[in-house]
Amino acid sequence: MTIIDAIKIAFRSIYANRLRSLLTALGMIIGVASVIALIAIGQGTQQGVKQEIMGLGSNLIFIQPGSSTDQSTGSKGGRGSSTTLVLSDVDAIMDAEIDGLYGASGQINFPAQAIGGGNNDRVDVVAVDAEYAYVRDLNMEYGSFISDNDVTRKAMNIVLGHAIADSLFPTGDPIGENVRINLGSRFGFNFRVIGVLSESGGQNVQDASVYIPIPSLMNRLRFLKNPTGGTTIQQISIKIDENVDEVVIKSELEDVLMMEHAVLEPDFIINSQNDLVSAASAVSKTLSILLGSIAGISLIVGGIGVMNIMLVSVTERTREIGIRRAVGALSKDIRLQFISEALVVTIGAGIIGVIVGLTIAIVINGRVIAGQQMITVIELWSVLVAFGVSSIVGLISGSYPAHRASMLDPIVALRSD
Amino acid sequence: MIELSKISKDYYTEAGTVHALRNIDVKIQSGEFVAIMGQSGSGKSTMLNILGCLDQPTTGQYSLDGINVGDKNDTYRSILRREKFGFVFQSYNLVPRLTAVEQVELPLIYQGASNKREIALEALARLNLDDRAHHFPQQLSGGQQQRVAIARSLVVQPQVVFADEPTGALDTQSGKDIMKIFSELSDEGITIVLITHEQHIADQSSRILEMSDGQLVFDSLHGRNSL
Ligand SMILES: Nc1ncnc2c1ncn2[C@@H]1O[C@H](COP(=O)(O)OP(=O)(O)OP(=O)(O)O)[C@@H](O)[C@H]1O
Ligand SMILES: [Mg+2]
């Protein structure tokens, strides 16, 4: 018997039991579709996070305050909760003249409401020094970025991210316009627009941020004051030469800041962009594996369903097997027939599952679901794995029933009813 | 040529051992038309199934054209059935959900023949079933179903056709038609071994064997009780 004959027979009997075959295949279809869709979501998340981090600029190192320790309770706060990083640390880093270090810039972030051009929007206010644009590779669409002069004069100047400029001043160039920054209902400050950033594209937060000189609000907002008299900052960004070993720079930075802070253990955290990418990748990889395994389990459950139905089918068709043996079918012909049947069901389910899974991944891509923007990245390997696993499941779950069918004694099979 | 010597078949059941066949010795030459008779339970079907390599004896030797089939494995016996034997059963044994022509194609599929449809239609035509080729078993009368089964047994041009009460489930006229076909096949030189309960059917054969309690008690070739 040829494989083609076996497949023809398989299609005949699947068609004869179409509802049952469909229900059996459904388990596999759901399994395969979810493997592909969930891996696409996992990969999309991973890529989104990676792009976001890489989009911050190239070859960056970030320094943040270490977790603070409450002296009375000894309980540790979260990362960045202490006030150990001050604006003068930036000068200390620049003064150290570390090899391969191009620039350093301190920043403070806080959310606010921006009102301008008769519109308002929620923004992320980033209070920065003049180095920021250089360190973070920001490009201007209109005007200029905050200058050293603005910082010295504590000027009430503001630079708008591209999306904010669009939403406040949809009609065009907002240079010279007034923007009011409201912090809660009690504080409000007027700024003059001196620049607009070009669009960063992608998922970047910089489009939804506005930038002001770091000292402008220092005296006006108490939370920016450090007990030591310096200006507390939340992060220092450092731009480095991509050809220099970041590990060396990180250790030099650590030495400089420990000396500056007069501490023996770092009270700050240094991360390179690569550290952040790999931390984020590790999280989303775990997520992918988790999602993949859940889907994989449903494939196995589907496979058990296929095996169950194949066993029923063999029992139901014992007499048919006897007839086929009587007219000369070899034991291996019978085995081939039933394996083909299991494979046609599972591979058919695999193909439908791949189509359904890909459709789901494509349809949800870019949509906001439960407040989260879904990004899906379809990986060829996930399609191959889902397909391969379903074929293997078919082979395994078809093997035992097919073996039972092939081992039936012709005369016993013929006499059964 | 078929030769059974000292063939026995025992069934072991909870109720005890059943000796379905006891020391059967028989030779069947090619071209013979043999009718097997005997009471119910005398072992006729058991012997036919062993002759057709569907079943195996407990002890004894079976040789076909000088080859000891008892030594051969399942695949060898399957190929014998596929290439040399045809079977016709009292209950037709057609596969449900296959059309008449597909039933007849079955042995050809396992042979790996290429122009299956053509050969199968020819075999059906020979049994005057051209107009029923695409009917399913449940759409055919008993006589027609049995003719499909005969067409299926003939399609591989067998040396021997084994028939277990082929007319048992048919009315007199259909039975006569079927017997006419067997006579024709016999005339063409095909060996036929056929079980029947009816004397007038057995009379159309060239040789009658009679069984009783697992033993061969009469062979018309040798005369009564000559065994
Ligand atoms: N699978 C089996 N297990 C146990 N005993 C069996 C089995 N098959 C047949 N027998 C016994 O073997 C004996 C011969 O059976 P067989 O079917 O050959 O009889 P038969 O001559 O064909 O009868 P009938 O004319 O009723 O078809 C019977 O006594 C039967 O009960
Ligand atoms: Mg019988």
Image: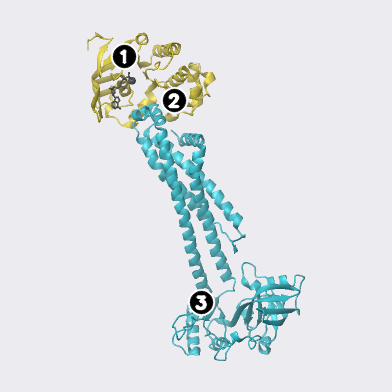
Do marks 2 and 3 share a chain? Answer: no
The mark lying in front, picked from 3 and 1, is: 1
Residue drawn at (71%, 82%) of the image: A191
Render colour scheme? by chain
Residue B40 at x, y percent in the picture: 31, 18
Q: Is A287 located above or below residue A156 in the figure? A: above
Q: Is A207 located above or below residue B200 in the figure? A: below
Q: Is mark 1 within 8 Å of ligand 1?
A: no
Q: Please tell me whether mark 2 sits on a helix, a strand or a loop.
A: loop
Do marks 2 and 1 share a chain? Answer: yes
Left or right: A365 with respect to B101?
right
- The picture's colour for chain A is cyan
Q: Please tell me whether mark 1 sits on a helix, a strand or a loop.
A: strand
- Does the residue at mark 3 contact the one at mark 1 (Cβ under 8 Å)? no
Mark toward the start of the polypeptide (2 vs 1)? 1
Instruction: State the CA–CA distance, disc 3 to disc 1.
Output: 97 Å
> Which residue is labeled 2 in the image?
B94
The image's mark for residue A138 is: none
Q: Quadrant of residue A73?
A: bottom left
Residue type at numbered disc 1: Met
- The chain under label 2 reads B
Q: Please tell me whether mark 3 sits on a helix, a strand or a loop.
A: strand
Q: Quadrant of ligand 2?
A: top left
Say which of A4 and A117 sits in front. Answer: A117
Which residue ends up furthest to the front in the rendered image?
A185
Residue type at numbered disc 2: Leu
The image's mark for residue B37 is: 1
Residue type at numbered disc 3: Asn
Q: Quadrant of the N terminus of chain A?
A: top left
Task: Identify the chain drawn in yellow.
Answer: B
> Which residue is labeled 3 in the image?
A271
